Image (cartoon, coloured by chain):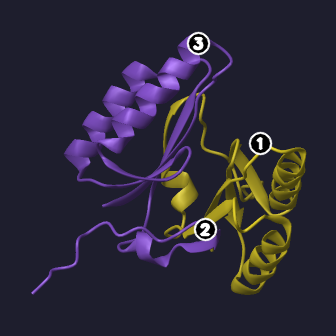
Chain colours: A purple, B yellow
């Protein structure tokens, strides 16, 4: 599945800034960071469940927010971009 | 179409902070702000083209980035959320 994960973490406290780093680090293990708080992730249901569970342990559910959108198949390749945004390669093309 | 618009604007300068406000304000005219720099937008192709054109006039294309994802039909209602994130109503339900 092609997934888009976006988050807002309250960084007004040192603890919040730590949570932000941990959320980003955890997402980096699962996909591509395409903007400061936006990740493109390719995952199956099982991996997704684990990812959401892990993130839920990291965030402060009273102040932080995570949203996870399911994109159509090949959704990453149809993103429209402005400015420095670029379409990121997810699946290495087969080099024959 | 259900669309997800995400952006990063370089706010290290006063001009950047002005651009950020203008991008957010412009997007508020087209959809729902669901996180600091994430908007859920329902638009047709023509409106979308105009929106992207307008945003392109606002941002600094050397430092800022805008990404626009097409979601499956009813994509907003299948978003998974953690923390304070909530599914936002887009189309008022018919009150019979």
Which residue is pictured at 70% across the width and 67% down the height? B42
Location of residue B80 with respect to A70 vertically, above or below: above
**3 and 1 marks on the same chain:** no
Please state the chain letter of the residue tagged with numbered disc 3 in the rendered image.
A
Camera-side residue: B56 or A51?
B56
The residue to which callout 2 is attached is: B68
Asked if residue A58 is positioned above or below residue A86 in the image, the reply reads above
| Mark 3 or mark 1, whichever is nearer to me | 1
x, y percent for residue A86: 52, 70
**Is any part of residue A61 visible from this angle?**
no
Q: Residue at label 3?
A: A14
> Which quarter of the rendered picture does the N terminus of chain A lie within?
bottom left
Q: Position of residue B13 (x, y in %)?
A: 83, 45
Q: Secondary structure at mark 1?
A: loop
Which numbered disc covers residue B12?
1
Nearer the observer: mark 3 or 2; the answer is 3
């Amino acid at each position: 599945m092609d997934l888009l994960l976006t988050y807002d973490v309250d960084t007004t406290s040192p603890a919040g800034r730590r949570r932000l780093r941990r959320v980003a680090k955890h997402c980096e293990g699962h996909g591509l960071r395409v903007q400061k708080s936006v990740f493109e992730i390719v995952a199956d249901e099982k991996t997704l469940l684990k990812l959401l569970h892990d993130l839920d342990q990291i965030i402060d559910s009273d102040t932080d927010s995570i949203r996870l959108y399911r994109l159509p198949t090949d959704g990453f390749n149809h993103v429209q971009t402005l400015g420095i945004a670029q379409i990121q390669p997810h699946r290495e093309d087969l080099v024959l």
